[in-house]
Amino acid sequence: MRLDEYRGFVLDADGTLVHRDGDETHVQPGAQEVLAKIRASGRPLAVFTNGSHAPPETFAAGLREVGLEIANEELLTPLRSVQAHLRSEGRGESPVLLFADDSARDWLVEAGLNVVEGEEAERAEVVFVAHVDRVEFVELERAARAVLAGAALLTASYAPAYAGANGPIFSRGAMTTAAISKASRTQPVIVGKPSRAALQTISERLGAPADQLAVIGDDLGMDIALGKLGGACTILVQSGISGAVDLQALPEQERPDAAVDGVAEILDWL
């Protein structure tokens, strides 16, 4: 396979570029070389992770600490794509009832999100759920009432869990979203992977439409689904959560264009 024709690359982090084992993070074989070869070709890249418990700069710094040179602006998360979604919907200044940890909340407020709290939350026009460690029933009820009154319900991710070193790590953001969704009888809109908002954020960053990009990741339901949504080239890295996959057994609409055992195999295609 050749990737010469693609104008930019978006890669996943965990399971693709790095592997986490408890508190330790290891760079996957070939990851540094792949990033270097993309840059040497003069084409842009981005790393999109669905993590929403911290600002994007924190994730970028973590990757740099283990040896991957990722600039702050190259690191994309739902905290960036929720802003793209709100702009595209004409809600850039709408009052937002936010479920997020302190550092993510502070980052979003500094970025210009109109966050409302307490009794002010009654006028919220958007409810956005990122990762949250603690939530009170009164907050859930307030959010459900806002959604019933017409507020949009957005979530960073609706995946129930993600892979951890000792088994699945359940998503507290998804649990919180599910509670609000159930009470308000409203399906949430995902703004992380896979979503139109994520694609818009990626295209804006890389300066190219989605169908001229290559999406590389280890999760069929997140990374490959994201690429398929935008008509991008999709490459499944089988070193992560989805593992080895019989491509022919997958429905055509879910099938990646190629699969590799590890990201190092992409080097010869660049």
Image: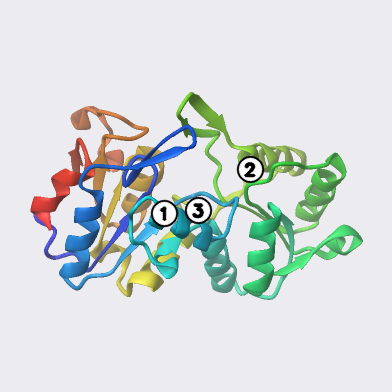
Judging depth in this view, the residue of 124 and 223 nearest the camera is: 223
User: Which residue is tagged 3?
Assistant: 192
**Residue tagged by mark 1?**
65
Give the Cα separation between the discs numbered 1 and 2.
Answer: 27 Å
Front in this rendered view, residue 36 or 250: 36
Q: Position of residue 117 (x, y in %)?
A: 83, 61
Q: Secondary structure at mark 2?
A: helix
Residue at label 2? 173
| Three-letter code for the amino acid on which mark 1 is drawn | Glu
Q: Residue at x 36, y 62 (%)?
A: 70
Secondary element at image label 3? loop
Camera-nearest label, 3 or 1: 1
Which residue is drawn at the image coordinates 83% and 42% (left, top)?
Answer: 136
Q: Position of residue 247 (x, y in %)?
A: 21, 32
- In this view, the residue in front, 131 or 139, is 131
First in sequence, mark 1 or 2: give its number.
1
Q: Amino acid at mark 2?
A: Gly
Left or right: residue 178 compared with residue 250 = right
Give the amino acid at mark 3.
Gly
Marks 1 and 2 in Cβ contact (< 8 Å) = no
